[in-house]
Image: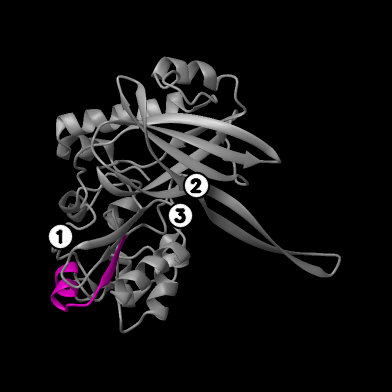
Amino acid sequence: MRLDPRRLAARRPPLLGAVALLGGVLALSSACGGGESGSDGWDAATLGRVSQAQPFTASLINAQVGAGPARLGFGLFDRDGGLVHDAAGALRLVTLEGDKPTEAGRFDLTRVALEETETHTHDGKTETHTDPVATVYVANVDLARGEWWGAELAVRTADKEHTLRTRFFVQEKTSEPAIGAAVPRSTQRVLRDVRDIAEIDSSNPPRPALHELTVAEAIASGKPSLVAFATPAFCRTRFCGPVVDSVVAPLAERYAGRVLFLHIEPYDLAQARQGRLVAIPELEQWGLTTEPYLFLVDGSGKVAAKFEGITSAEEVEAALRRLLGN
């Protein structure tokens, strides 16, 4: 979910905001198919032209991409703008210097889906259906430096193979904490600061266990923690999933006593309930321009892993196990 654009414009450095916007626009407009593997075909004009002949396009959905380890998420869109839910495939990355590609590695694409389960009774029989609401295709990569990059997705869907291309800009440094960087020692409002948990939690029912500690207190404990910026009630876009219910809460039960779990609503809930989405100060502290966002923080207060948008419990648990194993 995008945050209030007026607030973002006020707090983002002008150059960073312009670069991020340009990268996002080109990623959306130039996603395409084309099988070339030589030096041609990576300029924006060619990508846009070839895309018109393809049944669907690929677009990078990350709000910001910085040099270093990154979790890239791609959405696949059909001609009507609908998401493709049943694809599988792999990712090839190239760096682009003057639109000339240099090989930068091949990676597996993992399907991560937000699903909705419906139960209904027909002729006395109860049936349950699980349907995907939103799907992204994720690759964990290491981006060597800030510059233009190209992504070629070899995907299979409905027994057909497609080669899709898009390009995106990698910044040397993004506004949110990078992997290995220290996170802000935020002192967000918690249970002891409010009369009603509804002031700081839009979950239904609320989850008080996720609002007992500030980020600063969690870091001071020396234990690893998971900090979730997410809003269960005011999620507005197709890539904004219910990560508190589907990821944070289940893992909090499973890892109780070993990992601290914190949920921070990204908006002032009193105003959100009046129809105004006003970002809380902690989003500016963390440099976040989107939500939901999960940060896995080690015992010293540094980012061990981070997840933007639709995320699965399996993804986050794998990172938790690596951290606890270390």
Identify which residue is drawn at 14% across, 66% down. Answer: 187
Q: Say few, some or many: other residues with alpha carbon within 10 Å of mark 3 (under 14 / 14 to 19 / 20 or more).
A: many
Please give left or right for residue 133 compared with residue 281 in the image: right
Q: Is 221 colored magenta in this rendering?
A: yes
Looking at marks 1 and 3 on the same chain, the residue that comes earlier in the sequence is marked by 1
Please give left or right for residue 226 compared with residue 218 in the image: right
Mark 2–mark 3 CB contact (< 8 Å): no
Q: Is mark 2 on a helix, strand or loop?
A: strand
Measure the C-alpha gap from mark 2 to mark 1: 28 Å
Measure the C-alpha gap from mark 1 to mark 3: 26 Å
Q: Outermost residue toward the right?
A: 123
Marker disc for residue 136: 2
Looking at marks 2 and 1 on the same chain, the residue that comes earlier in the sequence is marked by 2
Q: Say few, some or many: other residues with alpha carbon within 10 Å of mark 2 (under 14 / 14 to 19 / 20 or more).
A: many
The residue carrying mark 3 is 241
Whether 41 is drawn above or below 240: the answer is: above
- Quarter of the image for the C terminus: give it: bottom left
> Dividing the picture into quarters, in which one does residue 171 lie?
top left
User: In front here: 270 or 83?
Assistant: 83
Q: Nearer the viewer, mark 2 or mark 3?
A: 2
Identify which residue is drawn at 57% across, 50% down. Answer: 133
Q: Where is residue 211 in the image (x, y as percent from the top left)?
A: 28, 72
Q: Give the range drawn in magenta.
A: 215-228
Three-letter amino acid code at the position of disc 2: Val
Three-letter amino acid code at the position of disc 1: Ala
Q: Is 48 colored magenta in this rendering?
A: no
